[in-house]
Amino acid sequence: MYETNYHRPSSVEEAVSLVGSTESGKFLSGGMSLLPAMKQRLAAPSDLVDLRHVEEMKGITVNGREVRIGGAVTHFEIKNSDEIKSVCYGLHHMASVLGDPQVRYMGTIGGSVANNDPAADYPAAMIALDATIHTSKRAVKASEFFVGLLETVLDDDEIVTAVSFTAPEISGYEKFRNPASRYAMCGVFVAKTGSTVRVGVTGAGADGVFHWDEAAQALSANFAPDAVANLSVDPGGMLSDLHGSSEYRANLVKVMAKRAVASAK
Amino acid sequence: MTKVAMKVNGRQVSGEVEGRTLLVHFLRENLGLTGTHVGCDTTQCGACTIHMNGQAVKACTILAAQAEGTDIVTIEGIATGGELHPMQAAFKQHHGLQCGFCTPGMIMASIDIVNRHGSDLDEQTVRHELEGNICRCTGYHNIVKAVLAAAGAQEQRQAAE
Amino acid sequence: MGIEGIGASVLRKEDKRFITGKGRYTDDMVVPGMKHAVFVRSPYAHAKIVNIDTSEAEAMPGVIGILNGKQLTEDGIGNLICGWMVHSKDGSPMNMGAWRPLAQDTVRYVGDAVAIVVADTRAQARDAADLVNVEYEELPVVTGVEDALAEGAPQIHPEAKNNLIFDWVLGDEQATADAFSKAAHVVKMDIVNNRLVPNAMEPRAALGVYDAAEDHYTCWTTSQNPHVARLVMSAFYNVAPENKLRVIAPDVGGGFGSKIYIYPEEIVCLWASKRTGVPVKWNCDRTEAFLTDAHGRDHVTHAEMAFDADHHILGLKVETKANLGAYMSLFSSATPTYLYATLLSGQYNIPAIHANVKAIYTNTTPVDAYRGAGRPEATYVMERMMETAARQLGVSPPELRRKNFIRSFPHQTPVIMTYDTGDFEASLNAAMQAIDYAGFASRRAESESRGKKRGIGMSCYIEACGIAPSAAVGSLGAGVGLWESAEVRVNAVGTIEILTGSHSHGQGHETTFAQLVAERFGVGIDSVNIVHGDTDKVQMGMGTYGSRSGAVGMSAIVKALDKVEAKAKKIAAHLMEADEGDIVIENGELKVAGTDKTLPWFQMALAAYTAHNLPSGMEPGLKEGAFYDPSNFTFPAGCYICEVEVDPDTGKTEILNFVAADDFGNIINPMIVEGQVHGGLAQGIGQALLEGCHYDPQTGQLITASYMDYTMPRADDLPSFQISHQTTPCPGNPLGIKGCGEAGAIGSPPAVINAITDAIGTNGLSMPASPQKVWAALHNA
């Protein structure tokens, strides 16, 4: 990788001001996407501002069904949280199938949400949970936060400090992994509260994560795997690559949605 | 160049590194701990797996500077008093290695698996938990056997400590 | 056998250093003053080099030197060559194009080395390499064999018109045509054998050290055969005379064929060390490995098999186009010819066979032998054909095979090989029993009740190991002899060193070779050391590939042990005043049979070195060497059966059970042999289910250039394996062993594909059977 300067702030304020003072600095959270990109010389930030030591971005709080997860919370911490497990099975399950064990220790929810990789898992959960993304500047609904492939509303000097949501009554997540990279080739998160169902889809859409309105509607009427059986997904809106054509991904969206409903708790 | 300091295999160490220096290169080149290997560029093969503050992580995707102040254990640091760690012993006993290149990372990841699961492990769990480590020689058959066998022994040793 | 002798599952002596992080691989080596190299590589698959401007790069911090192909040519460094001459059917020699270690005028694949940057640190070398400004003029690109042969295709080497390297035939064309004219049924198939990347976990590396005072070079390198590396670098590449070049292959992290070849990088590092005056180390990163390690397989085949009305095979016709990539790698010509077409009789009586192989240049990474080398391709053709024939003829797959098995030995096939021994039915029976073949129907019904599709498929493979004898391979075009050497040194205290030309990079030689000594002399394996991998220590050797280290390497050791034993007995007989013929060696003692007279092994050894009381005329010391040249190949064979379940919704295949029944002849260490089978199976299953190279046909870019896109088998992709052995000892070598290193990779791919196609009910499916492909096959069926 190109040479870079490492900084370790202890507050959000300090982190923001540090990045602002650099030529092309970037925030470094778990580093599980940024560092590999830098190693391949696909990214060359002049400075890295490490967020893993910012106390205010740590910790999970669950009050009743209100959940707040700090941006620097790792996948492992989410997977390991009994509180998350008890109020939001889908997110707990997602964190336990995300990456591999070593990656789960380092990677953070804030980093993943901010990066918005089209094959990342959390964006699907954020969309389905109708989560709020809290940044160093504002609070944004997930549906507005994610803009496109690797794109969000974040400014260069803006940090995802936390995410929050009201836990659904039941939720589930199923994904089909890219056989090589093991990233999601299609991941579907379903969340149901009362008669409202939301369906977040990652890995498949040509524009990144999306809410599958038709499925949400069908599942609101009948929360059962068969409810999505007759829906069709337009391959035209799907990603296509070596491992999954758009037709194949369109199929996977439906299959994973059925399975997420079936496994939802 | 910046100075980094951390504990490695129980000893306080420090060194001068560039901002971009990866932890694995600090271990291998500054400290001469060449048991930790680099097998890929994309954080997938796990040959560089070490323990940082008790957790198995990939040293190829952590800057040395990020590890400042941490407690690092590498493959060279797990045998105590000349006695192999139960996971090391199990890899030998069950022929869980051939060329040996992925082995240090496999062992470090496997110790972490047992740390999290205890002896409550089955074949399927071990296979899933090894997702972050690639071996080209063994077909994983004997690695899985070794981890399952070591699970009980490692737990016993930890209970005794 | 004793607890450490032949047949015992002795734990490996070499393990301790690997499990404690004390293995010493090439990249672990540090020498005083060592600097680091990064290669500047072509980003284009085919282009003219117009200009190389290094001025900006040379100004970067830490840069010591930047060297290019012109300087390499000035210094007389030779072309990389293919060491096996194959002739076309018209008698003309193969059309080999020039391969410069650093491309001078033209680059021919993405990754072709253009320049080397030497700097204080690897990072600095990389920074500078990025600033070497190479001006290219792009040329049209071709990546596939059909396109490369087409009229008007880009011409890759001037020496090979229409990119055709050779057009080779084997077998009797007329006899085969006659056989087909009598056929009651003909089965025809188009078969693709997918291109693979070997992916040894240790990336290649080289450390070149030039000592100006001695005018001597040392090269540490990731090699399966350091002596061959030295020979080739001396005799053909003009790096240095053999006596001025030491090649050391220390611990090597897997090879699978990819570390047989002498690549540009080690040549250039040695040369650059002299040019720059510093030791030069290069360590490959993974993407670089994907681009530059010799790839494997890549055949496109049309095959036809003729049967009589009673389902006996009458004849086989095979036409194969083999993609050799942009340059001819060291043994690239042998792999799709003498290691492939010679195995096209499989386990079957086939009266007439005719094979035609065209080898073709493309703008892709060079292709050479990868675990199995030709035999996986042959087995895939044979066993896909047999399974397809059974389906088309409406007979059971095992019965069709049984009906055509070769049952008497030796058996001369129509394609050169003389099979020495075997019992194919024994392995078939063992495998069918192990997997409960008879109970499959009810298991399939159970899967169907869960909405899944279950299938079973088999593969009866035969392969050839220990490629030999030297005179025969020489007559077929090999540039080297394929013997092995060994030296047994008994020290004065009775401990033993075995120096071998075989190289261990995972195979466990340090243990199995010591077991031979334990068996012979009854000494513990801890008192035996295996020395290998260093041209200064071991006189000469041909290295490890083609599953030859057992059949050939160990046989050389046996020959040397015979000589040591003979001398030891003479010494013992002399000291105990007995007849030489009455001396027996047991449990570390030399005994006079029928008496209580004994002489400890170490005392005999000491006597050999004190030389105070030796038989008249005997030389002091106890050290013997041997060269062993086999009389024939060996022929491991077996039957693999795979049972799969396919998820029709996603196309994902799960391997539920995989049984291997192999005949490797006698086995030295069952634990190690089974480990070799496990690894081979994983690679074969990987080929069938997961792995495959994909080039962009327009640009020649390798799309699958990292683990993000190339699917390496991981633990949860594979099952545990059930393994058994059926033994017919090999009559061709003193140990009766055949070789086990490649069988798993050779036999398994067709078993997997036969199982999946059985599950989904459609025969047309190419490797790798990725979920997407299987889903599409189901969807379109």
Image (tube, rainbow, N blue to C red):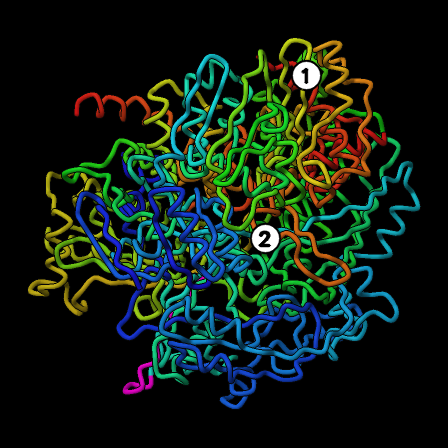
| Residue A102 visible from this viewpoint | yes
Q: Position of residue B77 (x, y in %)?
A: 23, 43
How many neighbours does mark 2 have within 10 angstroms: few (below 14), some (14-19), or many (20 or more)?
A: many
Q: Given the image, what chain letter belongs to the residue carrying mark 2?
A: C
Secondary structure under the numbered disc 1 in the rendered image: strand
Q: Which mark is residue C197?
A: 2
Q: Is residue C506 above or below residue C717?
A: below
Q: In this rendering, would C260 be left or right of A242?
A: left
Q: Are marks 1 and 2 in contact (CB under 8 Å)?
A: no
The quarter of the picture where residue C770 lies is top right
Magenta stretch: give its range.
C204-215
Identified by mark 1, the residue type is: Val
Q: Is residue C732 above or below residue C431?
A: below
Give the CA separation, mark 1 to mark 2. 46 Å
Q: Is residue C207 magenta?
A: yes
What residue is rendered at 75% in x and 21% in y? A215
| Residue B99 visible from this viewpoint | no
Nearest the eye: C82 or C317:
C82
Name the quadrant of the N terminus of chain B: bottom left
Q: Is residue C479 magenta?
A: no
Identified by mark 2, the residue type is: Val
Q: Which residue is mark 1?
A: A197
Q: In this rendering, would A8 be left or right of C71?
A: left
Name the quadrant of the C terminus of chain B: top left
What residue is rendered at 47% in x and 52% in y? A26
Q: In this rendering, would C240 be left or right of C342?
A: left
Q: Position of residue C412 (x, y in %)?
A: 67, 49
Secondary structure under the numbered disc 2 in the rendered image: loop
Q: Is residue B22 above or below residue B120?
A: below
How many neighbours does mark 1 have within 10 angstroms: few (below 14), some (14-19), or many (20 or more)?
A: many
